[in-house]
Amino acid sequence: MSEVKENTVAAPLQLTPGAITALKKIMQDQNVPEDYGLRVGVKGGGCSGFSYILGFDAIKEGDQQYEIDGLNVVMSKAHGIYLLGMEIDYVDGLNNRGFTFNNPNAKDTCGCGTSFSA
């Protein structure tokens, strides 16, 4: 009997094609271990109350796992309420370069775009 993974539900967030491309390039350039996933989450702090967590990390007990376009995404179950419906994009323009977070749950955001209140 084959093992069934818990990640059979749809991911609560979206990654744009630009974000997927940038993240896969970072994984390759930084030699991120294959068993790591993209950790998306929130932490207290920032100018609006919460700031986003985005980085590669080992999977921890209690994490939820999702696959988005071949990329393993992990997050703490407790963070799902803050991230439901969020879209992560990568912008590579003359005036702005980096990841952007479009979070429909944010009641207020700051000018830096990486901090919000819920």
Image (cartoon, rainbow, N blue to C red):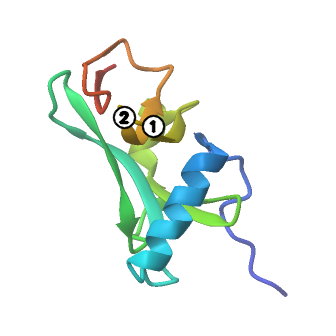
The 10 Å Cα crowd at callout 2, few under 14, some 14 to 19, many 20 or more, is few
CA–CA distance in space, label 1 to label 2: 5 Å
Q: Amino acid at mark 1?
A: Gly
Give the residue type that dot 2 points to.
Asn
From the viewer's perspective, tell me whether residue 53 is left or right of residue 17: left
Does dot 2 land on a helix, a strand or a loop? loop
Picture coordinates of residue 57 (x, y %)? 37, 70
Q: Is the residue under label 2 in contact with that under label 1 (CB below 8 Å)?
A: yes
In the orientation shown, which residue stands out farthest toward the right? 1
Residue 93, which numbered label?
A: 1
Task: Give me the residue at 75% from left, 73% from top.
Answer: 4
Farthest residue, direction top: 107
Question: In which quadrant will I find the N terminus?
Answer: bottom right
Look at mark 2 in the image and give the residue it sits on.
Answer: 96
x and y, in percent, of residue 79 in the image: 40, 42
Q: Is residue 74 left or right of residue 67?
A: left
Q: Residue at x 47, y 35 (%)?
A: 83
